[in-house]
Image (cartoon, helix red, strand yellow):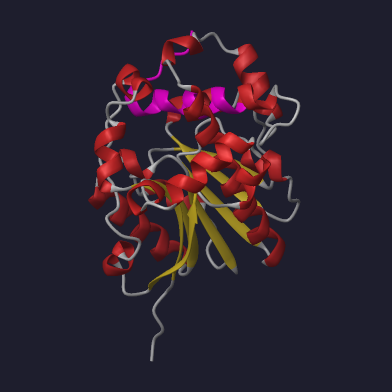
């Protein structure tokens, strides 16, 4: 029987959502590993009380991040990807890019489970550590041309100072990197705390973003590259007409479209004159 506490247990929510989505004939996202893990592990997923719309949103989030990551890998040479708080996600395997050097980082308990389903290779590495610790960064090679840091479903569970410190640790190691993550607005972060799955796991939502320019105030060498809205993107065109209309209506209202979105930044090493 799998036993994970608080924020660690929330990794089972997107895992189960991807497995359910993968059973559909016209799936938004197909995840063979999610199906395998859900069928294998001893856990009562019904206890998570996950609403159907949550399953859909988490699969949409994963697909949009897959799309961005795939484009990044295609247009860069010798890329290194650092997936913070990776959970049991299989993005490395879904994208199947032979050039990328990939590091999945998560708590020891999570990586112990992950090792039962994922084999490390010369290109794919599992790093057992809290992302807020500093020692794990020593596993990341210096001097790569292109780094991408992914934080999917992570930053909302950290304190702001922990996020800042983690980004500075990465910057000192890599120099310049691209960062993609999803975030709740301040308003949404308060509402999400009452979500049935969050209440069941006793996880705490600790951070929400006021404005996309907020990170540029943290670091003068941080540049916003892109905002990806769940309410307006190419993937929702594949959904049924009722769902598309709901998304289109939500996109008209700033509070709705900014409640939960994906943000992409470029964090640079300052030039030395």
Side of 113 where 108 appears, left or right = left
* Magenta span includes 16: yes
Report the residue at 38% width, 47% height from top: 183
Q: Nearer the viewer, residue 101 or 38?
A: 38
Magenta stretch: give its range: 1-18
Side of 137 where 220 appears, left or right = left
> In the rendered picture of this protein, how many numbered marks are placed on residues?
0
Side of 240 where 131 appears, left or right = left
Residue 97 position (above or below residue 157)? below
Report the residue at 48% width, 10% height from top: 46
| Displayed quadrant of residue 202 | top left
Image location of residue 44, percent across then percent down: 49, 8
Image location of residue 177, percent across then percent down: 49, 65
Image location of residue 239, percent across then percent down: 64, 38
Image location of residue 126, percent across then percent down: 56, 38
Report the residue at 56% width, 36% height from top: 243
Is residue 243 visible to the viewer in this orientation of the structure? Answer: yes
């Amino acid at each position: 029987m799998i036993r994970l506490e608080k924020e660690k247990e929330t990794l089972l929510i997107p895992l189960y959502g991807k497995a359910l989505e993968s059973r559909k004939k016209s799936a938004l996202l197909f995840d063979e590993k999610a199906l395998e893990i859900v069928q294998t592990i001893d856990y009562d997923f019904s206890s998570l009380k996950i609403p159907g719309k949550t399953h859909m949103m988490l699969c949409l989030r994963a697909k949009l991040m897959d799309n961005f990551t795939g484009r990044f890998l295609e247009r860069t040479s010798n890329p290194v990807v650092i997936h913070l708080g990776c959970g049991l996600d299989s993005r490395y395997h879904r994208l199947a890019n032979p050039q990328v050097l990939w590091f999945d980082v998560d708590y020891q308990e999570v990586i112990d489970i992950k090792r039962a389903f994922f084999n490390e290779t010369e290109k794919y590495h599992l790093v057992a550590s809290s992302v807020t610790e500093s020692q794990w960064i020593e596993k990341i090679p210096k001097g790569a041309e292109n780094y991408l840091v992914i934080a999917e479903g992570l930053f909302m569970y950290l304190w702001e100072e922990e996020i800042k410190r983690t980004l500075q640790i990465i910057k000192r190691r890599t120099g310049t990197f691209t960062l993609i993550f999803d975030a709740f607005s301040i308003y949404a972060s308060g509402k999400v705390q009452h979500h049935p799955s969050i209440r069941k796991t006793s996880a705490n939502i600790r951070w929400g973003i006021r404005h996309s320019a907020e990170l540029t105030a943290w670091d003068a060498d941080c540049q916003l590259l892109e905002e990806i809205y769940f309410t307006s993107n190419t993937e929702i065109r594949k959904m049924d007409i009722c769902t598309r209309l709901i998304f289109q209506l939500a996109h008209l209202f700033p509070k709705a479209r900014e409640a939960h979105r994906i943000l992409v930044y470029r964090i640079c090493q300052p030039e030395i004159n």
